[in-house]
Image (tube, rainbow, N blue to C red):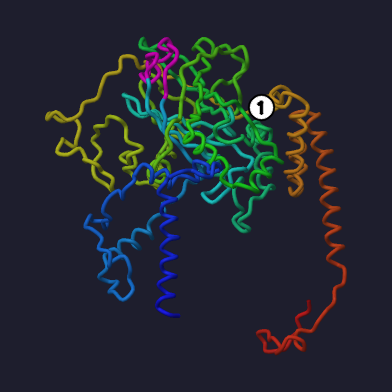
Amino acid sequence: MSTKNAMNIMKAIAVCLFSVIILVESNEYLNVTYQPAHRQLLDFKKEHPYPIGLWTKNAGDPVEIRDTTTINSDVFNNQLFIDTFSTFDGERIPERVVHARGTGAFGYFEVTHDVSKYTSADVFNGVGKKTPLVARFSNALQGLGGTDFPREHRGMSVKFYTKEGNLDLLCLSIPVYFYRDPIFFKHLLHAFTRNPQTTLFNPTSVFDFITLRPAFIHGFFWVMSDFGIPDGYRKMDAFPIHTYEVSNKHGETHYVRFNFRTEQGVAILTNEEAAALQSQDLEYFNRDLYNAINSGEYPAWKLEMDVMTPHDIQRVDYDPFDVTRLWKNGTFFTVPIGRMVLNKNVENNFRDIEQAAFNPGHLVPGITGSPEGLFRGRRMFYRDTQNYRLGRNHNNILVNMPLYSKTYARDGKPPTRLNMKNAPNYFPNSFNGPLPCVDEQRPWKKLQVLESNAVDLEPAWYFYNFILEDDAHRQRFINTWAAALVPVTPPVLQRTLKLLHQVDNDLGMRVAVTHEILLARAMAQQAAARAASAVPRPKRNLITSEGPPEHDNMGSVYKIEL
């Protein structure tokens, strides 16, 4: 190629590159189909029209351009190379045991109603008061590389940055939980997650566990119904599950269940709709939340609380602290509190969401928690898992830091922040270290809850007959049960059908009939597949037609037939 031709080619390439640069520099979204999630990098460039600064190594010294490649250089003296790979190897931290896959956003909570009669919590008092918060949404059982569409409950955890410390409300997309005793957490998780040999989800272990602990079935009914797959995180209600004891400025107590009601309207996905969406976008839930906030369609929830007085809880004919059942209509009244709005996407997911630590034990004056055993257990093992994942100083991570904090905790693995500087590190002391307060509003009496382990199928019966609003919903519920039972092996199958009959005879019969139909269909499909595979096909001897023979470990020659 002549020099002249080469120059012409270079000029043409330069013109093309210049044209591309001009197109990008215009920052115009000529393609209107771009979603906010697609535009993230271009949005950054619009906010920062020039490079944001000088590239430095981890210690802050500037990167020289010749160090950006290791070709023909001494890699052992290239500090940028060492920085790059030593940090890359440690990028990941242990993922959460549950609720690993998720997303989140920042926002605020605004008080809309006076609830000082029930609680003295500063965050809920003062109409018009706004409190910053961070919320995290998640799937319960999926790992980081999973899908958004399994049939399971979802999580919505909210951290309020209040003047009295952080308040964490850990919510589920269904209003009941599966068990009352915290010791079952590990076993439930193992039964519902991957088999240790096959590494596959095993329906038999799920139904085996549930039928041996029938009190679990009410929560499972919610998951198997239309409520099991919401249409994204924005269109689901959320419930902190526990019955909380709250107190007002006079020390008077009430017992409440908090509810977040979505203003977008509750929307669900059928099995068919979920399968269709999953084939197109495994990250539909995360993308939907990001796009909505970035487009200015800020999702919002109304916070309310169902209330009982101490007199009420002595008169009801059920345990109001039982997380596996709903409160009965007519035994409580509902009070609106305020409104949660999410109006800002996170800038760095690892910093703001993956390192966020939510703990049911993070409460504020005026909200003293729940006296039942599950809540006490969660206060312990949530702290333990966060110490494991993030370290014992995880409350010093930026997203977890309260607005005000002065402690006698010291040292340990970073982040230690200011480490309380030179203040006294013991209590009591006479040198003006931080002092405890006297909370005159805190209740003097401590409620003791005596829990029962008796099996009670009434909540599940009520769910089937009254929560499922029509027979069409009941039929979808039955179809989901029957399909889930097809791969379940006996005798777990028989035990599950017996339990469903005990809940409601109509439910048991309809699931059994539908299961027989689906099982017969599956057997017919398998028979057809076997018949198709039995059709003889032409055989050829690979030894004679494809070259030299293959040998087994003993050195003998064998034939491979196709």
Residue 385 seen from this side: no
**In magenta stretch: residue 380:** no
Residue 367 image point, x, y percent: 41, 21
Q: Does residue 367 lie above or below 271 as drawn?
A: above
Q: Quadrant of the N terminus?
A: bottom left
**Residue at point 48% right, 43% down?**
29
All told, the count of numbered labels is 1
Of residue 218 and residue 472, the one placed in the foreground of this image is: 472
Residue 360 seen from this side: yes
Residue 162 image point, x, y percent: 34, 25
Q: Left or right: 542 with respect to 293?
A: right
Residue 459 image point, x, y percent: 66, 25
Which SS does the magenta portion mostly show?
loop
Residue 63 image point, x, y percent: 26, 60
Q: Quadrant of the C terminus?
A: bottom right
Query: Which segment did they paint magenta?
Result: 109-129
**In magenta stretch: residue 117:** yes
Q: Which residue is mark 1?
A: 456
Q: Does residue 364 lie above or below 194 as drawn?
A: above
**Residue at point 25% right, 70% down?**
77
**Circle 1: residue type:** Asp
Of residue 206 and residue 53, the one placed in the foreground of this image is: 53
Q: Left or right: 78 with respect to 93?
A: left
Q: Does residue 76 lie above or below 122 as drawn?
A: below
Of residue 153 and residue 439, the one placed in the foreground of this image is: 153
**Residue at point 42% right, 9% down?**
117
Element class at badge 1 = loop
